Amino acid sequence: MAVFTFEDQTTSPVAPSILYKALVKDADNIVPKAVDSFKSVEIVEGNGGPGTIKKISFLEDGETKFVLHKIEGIDEANLGYSYSIVGGAALPNTAEKITIDTILSDGPNGGSVVKLSIKYHSKGEASPNEDELKAGKAKSDALFKVIEAYLLANP
């Protein structure tokens, strides 16, 4: 298995503590409210901490799909969160899993800086498909912006 690592960073006008609470601690409640296409979040295995696997169901192109999301680590003191996509619609056929490590910190004007490290664990030596990576990033960015807008509208 080869591992391909990508780094990304963005900013948000939402304070880091509020963003962290919404994306990590209250995500199961906030995300379905903020994102119309998200239908449910259920714990398949675990107790909500590291090792927990969640099944996130959503509607895409008129079809119900799901993603299996495994919590790898929670670092509340440093506003860090790590999870892997381990199954479902968001996992390309060439990947064993995709791990996303996130750290939030103070940003300009009371907002946040969001640093991401994405590790694509391929099956065998297959490299990631550029089009799939771009589509995945676009979906992830759009999801983040919808949640951010929800938080700004519902302080």
Image (tube, rainbow, N blue to C red):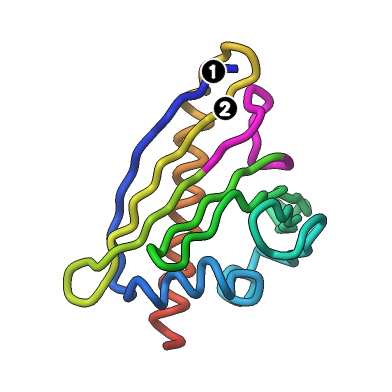
Residue 146 image offset from top left, x and y in percent: 47, 67
Q: Is residue 45 left or right of residue 17?
A: right
N-terminal-most mark, 1 or 2: 1
The residue sitting at the left extreme is 109
Front residue of 113/152: it is 113
Q: Is residue 91 magenta?
A: yes
Q: Which amino acid type is shown beneath numbered disc 2?
A: His
For the residue carrying disc 1, how many other residues have a C-alpha within 10 Å: few (<14), some (14-19), or many (20+)? some
Residue 26 image offset from top left, x and y in percent: 58, 75
Where is mark 1, residue-wise?
Answer: 2
From the viewer's perspective, is residue 72 above or below residue 46?
Answer: above
From the viewer's perspective, is residue 81 above or below residue 19?
Answer: above
For the residue carrying disc 2, how many other residues have a C-alpha within 10 Å: few (<14), some (14-19), or many (20+)? many
Q: Are marks 1 and 2 in contact (CB under 8 Å)?
A: yes
Residue 50 occupies quadrant: bottom right
Rendered-image quadrant of the N terminus:
top right
Where is mark 2, residue-wise?
Answer: 121
Q: Is residue 68 left or right of residue 71?
A: right
From the viewer's perspective, is residue 74 above or below residue 149?
Answer: above
State the count of labels. Answer: 2
* SS at circle 2: strand
- Which disc, if any, is residue 114? none
Q: Residue at image x 42%, y 30%?
A: 5
Q: Residue at image x 50%, y 38%?
A: 135
- Give the magenta part as a residue range: 87-99
Question: Gap between marks 1 and 2, in whole Å?
Answer: 6 Å
